[in-house]
Image (spheres, rainbow, N blue to C red):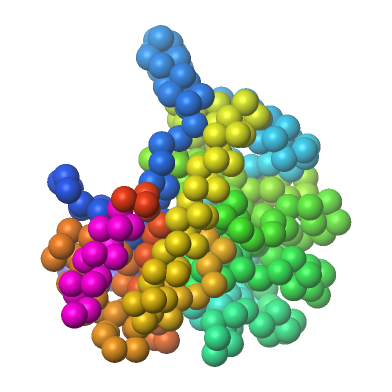
Amino acid sequence: MAWEENIHKVVPYVPGEQPVGTNIIKLNTNENPYPPAPGVADALRGIADEYDLMRRYPDPDARDLTKALADYYGIEDEQVFVGVGSDDVLAMSFLTFFDSDKPLLFPDITYSFYEVWAKLFRIPNKRIPLRDDFTIDPDAYLIPNGGIVIANPNAPTSLALDLDSIEKIVSGNPDSVVIIDEAYIDFGGESALPLIDRYDNLLVVQTFSKSRSMAGARIGMAFGSAKLISYLKDVKFSINSYTMSRDAIRIGTAAASLADENYFKEVTDRILKTREEAAGRLTEMGFDVAHSATNFLFVTHPDMKASDIYSALKEKNIYVRYFNLPRIDDHLRITIGTPEEMEELYKALQEVMK
Ligand SMILES: *Cc1c(COP(=O)(O)O)cnc(C)c1O
């Protein structure tokens, strides 16, 4: 068809499977195995009471949520941007900050959405190889570029980069915007947030989806200099004024409030404890387990192909993530579930690996 020639054809990002049905152990999309904070349930009930407000547009600036986040992190409201999950925040950021003829830099093994957005927005890009041990080499980012995006801790490798190395990349690239995607920062990494006051080219992106157990609410945020944030808002308001629903703003505000801080810490600690147990158990089974700073483990086994383990586990209704990609096609990414779910995983693995 002639009209097809005018279509912007893209290869989309493929999210992890969301199988329907019960009796499934879902360790494939890094969701939190525990419910969100109790304050979120109260906020949800509040929504039902005020259902009449649904006829009104939500606050285009999501001021309640922006303010709650600014208070929580001890920064100014003008340093905060919010969106429909960090995927939305990141996509807006790519569109805003990466408009150079020079290439956008990101690791060859990282969140695969980066390449999808770069292609969608026709941003020239260059993938910087991770070292053989899958760590990021900060010096490799000190080359001419039109921007940098790094997930820290990185996914799916689970490895964290220290703050000095992050600062080296940011300070070494004063002519580019550097985005640090901190989707997993609450599970062990060191946040670059304190650097935003010193480097106006740094954007730190976080999400409620992982550590705050709210993947279904779609809430993400970016922190940066007031100038960076205002450019980001200009692009957002050029696409859709009302990205965040009234409901999302309300429950996000509740979740960001300090009252729920203890619950959040407790859940995160529990996951870290299960993670360390899991690393030990999988190592005993002969897996090579990367040193995780996230809520998942990145593993490989010398005796059995990752793709075979993935399929065998799926037969047993246990879903983990397998990426058929260069360098990592013999690895699995396993989300940390509850201790009970992990016991089921060990049992299944023992049967599978016999
Ligand atoms: C999960 C994830 C995101 C996106 O999460 P949202 O649910 O859109 O907030 C972004 N970056 C990385 C590295 C992730 O793993």
Q: Is residue 182 above or below residue 65?
A: below
- In the figure, is residue 309 to the left or right of 330? left
Quarter occupied by residue 181: bottom right
Q: Quadrant of the N terminus?
A: bottom left
Q: Is residue 127 above or below residue 149?
A: below
- In the figure, is residue 282 to the left or right of 177? left
Q: Is residue 276 visible?
A: yes
As drawn, the residue found furthest toward the right would be 198
Where is residue 270 drawn, in percent x and y?
49, 48
- In the figure, is residue 86 to the left or right of 317? right
Q: Residue at x 28, y 62 (%)?
A: 345
64 and 274: which one is in front? 274
Residue numbers of the magenta segment? 341-354
Where is residue 250 drawn, in percent x and y?
51, 25
Question: Is residue 349 one of those drawn in magenta?
Answer: yes
Q: Residue at x 30, y 53 (%)?
A: 341
Where is residue 24 drawn, in percent x and y?
20, 52
Magenta portion: prevailing SS class:
helix
Q: Quadrant of the C terminus?
A: bottom left
Q: How many marks?
A: 0
Q: Is residue 92 visible?
A: no
Q: Residue at x 45, y 68 (%)?
A: 279
Q: Residue at x 52, y 55 (%)?
A: 272
Q: Is residue 181 above or below residue 289?
A: above
Where is residue 284 drawn, in percent x and y?
39, 76
Question: Is residue 167 one of those drawn in magenta?
Answer: no
- In the figure, is residue 181 to the left or right of 116? right
102 and 226: which one is in front? 226
